[in-house]
Structures are given as structure tokens and as C-alpha cells.
Amino acid sequence: MAIHERSLVEPERILRKDRLVIDGVDVSGDWNLIILPRVIEDYDLSLLDEILQQPEGKTILQCYQCSYCTASCPVHNYWDERYNPRHFIYLARLGMVDELQKRADVMWRCVSCHKCTHRCPKGVLVEEVLKAILRVLAKRGLIEEYPSKKFDKFFLEQVVEYGRIEDGELLFGWIEKQGYKVFKDPILKKPIPLFGDIPEWLKTLAVKPIKNMNIDFLILNAKHMLIHPKTKNWGKMKQVLRKVLQEEGVELH
Amino acid sequence: MAVPVQFRKPPLGGIGKKVAYYPGCSLEGAARAYDVSTRIVAKELGLELDYLEDYNCCGAMETKNVTFWGTMLLNARNMSLARQQGHSVIVAPCNGCSFSLQRAEYFLETDKNTLDRINQLLQEAGEKPLDTVPHTYHILEWFYHEAGPEKVKEKTRKPLRGLKVANYYGCLYTRPHFYSRTYSHLAPENEEQDRPRKRETADDDEHPYYMEALLEAAGATSVEIEPMHTQCCGGPHSLSDEEVSEKFVMMILQTAKRNGADIIATECPLCHASLEMYRHRLMLKGVPDVDVPAAYFTQLLGLAFGYSANDVKLKDNLSDPLPVLKKLGLA
Ligand code: SF4
Ligand code: SF4
Ligand code: SF4
Ligand code: SF4
């Protein structure tokens, strides 16, 4: 099989000598580069099948590898070159699970900015496809749970429970999950931002409305923290949502 | 592999003076200022917002990344509420919300099976199924099309003279055009057909200009920050991937500052929160050129329409835009 991707050739498999003379002929230079063959037997084509079954993954086959998505991607350009949407699609289509696993540390970093999807000339919903790939890998237990997924689930739990999100609870709940000690009042067990062992930036940011004497803002947000805003008649929706999530294999607490 | 798709005719021309208003959760809490100032601006421009009673969270990027059907259902419920209030257009002031609704619109329109299943789920949940899928616009597009710069100019009593504004649109206001702009990303089936056209009421994909057009009409000067005007702030990862978000926000703020901006105008509560939060963190770290404050574009328009800083709740902004505005005699 021809070599498709430079990044699939590990440095250990490249043999090259500074000087090489064979039968008295000097073949130093690029001539003497040899790449040891690599036999890949564990192509897993069922990966592609499963991606195609995801509602978001259906457009994956339209990709013709032009790399416009990668060229547009801010995570690729400003963060880590190993984050490469085009390449992930390529690997997923070949079913090269181990290569995808090697990139698990960057794969989740997509910030969902949709530059890739926006610009793809072939109508691939790139961002959605990438999320479908991640989801299938996670479902098969091939990658570990990544930070953003923990947050996404935490967010989803609030939505399912109340129908609405409350910024304070989201922020402090998340901080607490990170191992910080959030101070809570003893009766209602609601976080009080001024005390406790929370990051310095949060402490100094949270006192700003107090410093500014922004009383009605404080009252509003305190009220929301005490009584979580809810959507009325949410009971039935909650049930249906839970059912749908169960069918999709999403576990909530 | 092109999937044949049936599209409705794009709504050309007007959006309507009275629309369903989907504020989204943030606007009821931390981003109250945006809600208050939005209502002020709508009133001044002669437009009517019909509050969507008892809506639920759109789920944003976070739920979308975990569940397809759950997110569809969340948005379909809001659409169904809008239909019951008699609307076929929803406006949302948040990039996340307008994206979510538009995304749902896309999948519900392009895939009959999705629509059927969602309608069934809606009924199970005791909601009315969708007879037709309403269209969603970002509130900025609505202001621009139903009122426009002329109307803003007419209403301006205290022009924002001397204020240099960096207009920050964030990513999802214009992206991806599949969901919000064009009706089909697929090539036409035969040569005679045109590629299905864009909504006339949508902002430019790559070079959005509605916000600067409105603010310039109110007397402000725009500062060019391309391509950072649509650079992502890290959005859905702003809490879960702090390194990346910090870097992205730093790039945005520094570009604005170094191009001479006094203030960054935002049109999304999430972008706004992200900018303010990381601005604070970067400043604590002593990173240079990041101290530009942020304000919602509606707050700035409100000021120009003669409202006070208190009316548009400028105190709520954690990045303190007041000193800058006071210095220029605008607040
Ligand atoms: S832009 Fe589209 S076609 Fe090109 S590599 Fe990316 S997904 Fe494939
Ligand atoms: S959505 Fe993700 S993959 Fe696409 S351009 Fe943005 S960060 Fe890159
Ligand atoms: S995306 Fe944010 S603002 Fe929009 S509804 Fe959801 S939590 Fe509220
Ligand atoms: S800039 Fe950030 S908050 Fe705004 S739409 Fe993009 S990701 Fe969301």
C-alpha cells in the first residue's frame, strides 16, 4: 500500500545514513532513505459503519481530503498542530483505531467554532462528524473520558433536571468538581463565593458587584442561586429526555 | 453520497416587526443587562418582542456534544411554544441559542425521519407537535433588517462620538452557513438550477457588518480587528479547557487594544462572559494589552438613544466599561 500520510510514518521506521556506498557507488543523500514497511492488520471498518449510523456522522463520506477545514481550524493553527480535523476523518474512514487513540489527548479540544463546517467545499458537517467519531470511540471504551465531556454532562444534568441553567450553580459546581473547596452556607448548602478555597481570579471577580454596590444584580443572582430557575410543567419532558438519553447510551447521575 | 433534500422556500424580504423572543437562560441571570438593554432598543426602534413563555434551555454546545436527540427535543419544544404563540419567526440574542435553534431547524427540515420522531417525542412529553418549523434569527439580524441604520440614526439623541469600538461577533453568529445562511450546501441536481440561495436577511458569512453598521449609525467609530472579529473565544470549553480559552481570548483582546479600541461590543452573553472572565484572569497574570472592557451592543445603542448608564445596567459588566465611557462623556 502506498504511503498516504507522513504522520503515519514513525521516526523509528525511517532508515537513513549520512554516507552510503554500495558497490563503490556513493548513494549518499535522499537516495538512501528507506522506510521500513508496517503491516496493519487491525483496520476496524466497523468504526466507519457506526459513525455513519450517528445522525451527525452521515456526511463523513463526502470528504475529499482537501484540508480546508484544517487550514481554518483555530485549534490547529493557534494551539496544537497535531489537532487536524482532516486527518481524523481520514483515520476514521480507514478504521485506524490505534492511530486515533494516539491522538486522543488533542482530539477533544475542538471548541465547536464551526469554521471547518462553514468552509468545507463538500458539505461535510465537519464539526459534527468529529463529535460523532469521538462519541463512537468513547462508547467503545477506546478513549478515556475527557475534561470537556465531564463538563458537558454536568451541564446536561442541570438542563434535564430543571429545564434551565443557572450560571452560578454551573460555575461553582464545576469548580467544586475540580477539587476546590467551595464554602457553603450550613442550612441551604448553597455556595457563598466570598469564602472558601476557590481560585484567586474567581474570588476577585465575584466581589466586583459588591464593590460596585450593584444591589439589584446581587439580589437577582442570589435569588437564582437559592431557588434554581425552572421551566414549568417540566416533569413529562424530563421523563422523555431521560428515556431518549438512555437509548443513546448517555449515563447521567 | 449526496442526500436528496427538500427545502422550503427561503424567507426573502422582511422578518416581521413582531417576533417570538427567546432570551435564553443567561439573559435572565448574569446577562440581565443584555436583556434589559435589548428590550429598550427594540422599543425605541418600534419593534415588538413577544416573550416565549416557559421556554427551556437550548442546550448550547454542551448538550449537543453528548446527545443528538436530546438536543433536538429541547429545541423542538421551544419551537413548538413559538408556534403556539402564533409565530413563525424566533429571534434569540445569544449566539449559542440561535445556533442551537438553527441547527435543529436544519435537521428537522432536511430529514423527515428526524421530524417525525421528534414530533412523536413532543407528543409523549405533552407538547404540541410542530406543524411547521419556525425560522430563527439572531436578534442583530432582526434589528438590522426591520429597523436598520437609518432608524438608529433617527433615534440617536446622544451620538457615541469619539468612541472607538471593536465589533466582536464570535463564531456562531455567522457559522456555519449550512444552518443559518444558505438553504442547501449541496450542488444543484442539474445544471439549469441555481445553487439554492442565501437568505437575504442574513449577515455576510465571513465579513459580518451588521453590528458595526448599527453602531456607526449611532455615532461610534469602528476599529478593524479582522480576523479576530469571528475568532472563537473558547466558548463551550471556557471552563473545561482553560488553556485554550485563555489563549484565544488573549488574541482577541490584544488585537482590539493594539488597534486602538476603547471598548469591545458583543452580541452574545457567552462571548461576553468569556471575554470578561479571561480579561480579568489575564490582567491578574500581568499580560499586556488586554484591558479593553466589553459592553453589549444594545447597551451602547441604549446610551446613544439617551438612556442612562443605569438604565442599560452598565454596572453589571464585570469589565467596567464605565470609566472609558465617562471619559468620553457618554455615560
Ligand atoms: S474541508 Fe471538507 S472535504 Fe476538505 S478535508 Fe475537510 S472535511 Fe474533507
Ligand atoms: S469546530 Fe473544531 S475542528 Fe472545526 S474549526 Fe472549530 S475547533 Fe477546529
Ligand atoms: S445556550 Fe446558554 S443562554 Fe442559551 S439557553 Fe442555553 S444556557 Fe441559556
Ligand atoms: S465566541 Fe465563544 S461564546 Fe461566542 S459563539 Fe463563539 S464559542 Fe460561543
Image: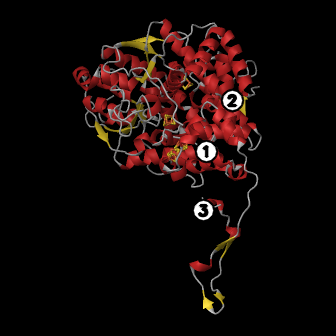
Residue under label 1, please give it. Answer: A109
Residue under label 3, please give it. Answer: A6
- Quadrant of the image occupied by residue B323: top left
Residue B51 image offset from top left, x and y in percent: 46, 11
Chain under numbered label 1: A
The answer as to whether the residues below labels 2 and 3 share one chain is yes
Number of residues whose C-alpha sits closer than 10 Å to that of mark 1, classed few (under 14), some (14–19) or many (20 or more): many
- Residues under labels 1 and 3: Cα distance? 23 Å
Q: Secondary structure at mark 3?
A: helix
Number of residues whose C-alpha sits closer than 10 Å to that of mark 3, classed few (under 14), some (14–19) or many (20 or more): few
Q: Judge depth for marks 2 and 1 and give the one in front.
A: 1
Residue A149 image offset from top left, x and y in percent: 68, 36
Chain under numbered label 2: A
The answer as to whether the residues below labels 2 and 1 share one chain is yes
Q: Are marks 2 and 3 in contact (CB under 8 Å)?
A: no
Work out whether residue A158 or residue B78 is closer to the camera in this orientation and state it: B78
Residue under label 2, please give it. Answer: A154
Residue B167 image offset from top left, x and y in percent: 37, 37
Q: Of the residues under marks 1 and 3, which one precedes in the sequence?
A: 3
